[in-house]
Amino acid sequence: MSDPSSSAPVPTLRVNSESVEAADLWRGTWQELAEKEAALTPAEFRTYLEQRATERINDHIAEVLLYQQAQLREPVADEKSLARFVDEQIRKIVTADFEGIQRRYENRLQAQGTTLDEVRQRTQRELLIARYLETELKPLVAEPTRAELLNVYEQNIDGLRRPARRRMALIDVRVQDRLPKEV
């Protein structure tokens, strides 16, 4: 599958005041799509692509709406601490996956069609959304009580039980032929 970002005008998704080109929704997934295209029939690939497109569009719309709401509710008071947190997250990725060499990480990002600044912005955005969800929405979700959990467990106990199984492995090593005759 070729990268359509290099072709003619690209359709744009607009959510409130934010726009994103369709090709940007697929950023970082070209390899995955190429592998799927090679593994599936054309009809299967089209179905897969339609499902993934629907997921990506829905996810992006939800992200934009959450981010816009988070911006209204969560003023970023300390941008320095936010920037430090983002840099720390990037350092963790570089250390864990790229042997501590940032240039390797930047090369991978470039191959995926993105930049380090875009990763920083996306990480800040995700942090703001997570903070919003934690402070504003999580308190609205009722935690189940122990009695409710026990009730659900008792109603589904038959489906949760596994039949008893045992497994035995026996290794038979013939050593008699290898031992001295007097043993």
Image (cartoon, rainbow, N blue to C red):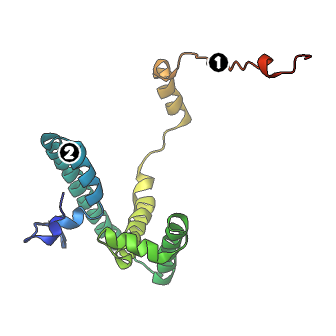
* Camera-nearest label, 2 or 1: 1
* Quadrant in the picture for the C terminus: top right
Above or below residue 54? Residue 178 is above
Give the quadrant of residue 103. Answer: bottom left
**Neighbourhood count class around disc 1 (C-alpha, 10 Å): few under 14, some 14–19, many 20 upward:** few
Q: Is residue 15 visible?
A: no
Residue situated furthest front in the rendering: 181
Above or below residue 50? Residue 166 is above
Task: Provide the secondary structure element on which disc 2 rests.
Answer: helix
Q: Position of residue 96 (x, y in %)?
A: 54, 64
Q: Which mark is residue 168?
A: 1
**Neighbourhood count class around disc 2 (C-alpha, 10 Å): few under 14, some 14–19, many 20 upward:** some
Q: Position of residue 119 (x, y in %)?
A: 38, 72
In the picture, measured across the screen, residue 132 lies left or right of residue 148, that is left
* Quadrant in the picture for the N terminus: bottom left
Give the quadrant of residue 21. Answer: bottom left
Give the quadrant of residue 137. Answer: bottom left
**Residue in the picture at 48% in, 44% down:** 143
Above or below residue 92? Residue 143 is above
Q: Is residue 51 visible?
A: yes
In the picture, measured across the screen, residue 115 lies left or right of residue 52, that is right
Q: Which mark is residue 154?
A: none
**Residue in the picture at 44% in, 65% down:** 131
Task: Provide the secondary structure element on which disc 1 rests.
Answer: loop
Q: Position of residue 133 (x, y in %)?
A: 40, 60
Above or below residue 78? Residue 142 is above
Between residues 52 and 150, which one lies in front from this camera angle?
Answer: 52
Label 1 sits on what residue type? Met
Q: How many angstroms separate mark 2 from mark 1 (CA)? A: 42 Å
Q: Which residue is mark 2?
A: 48
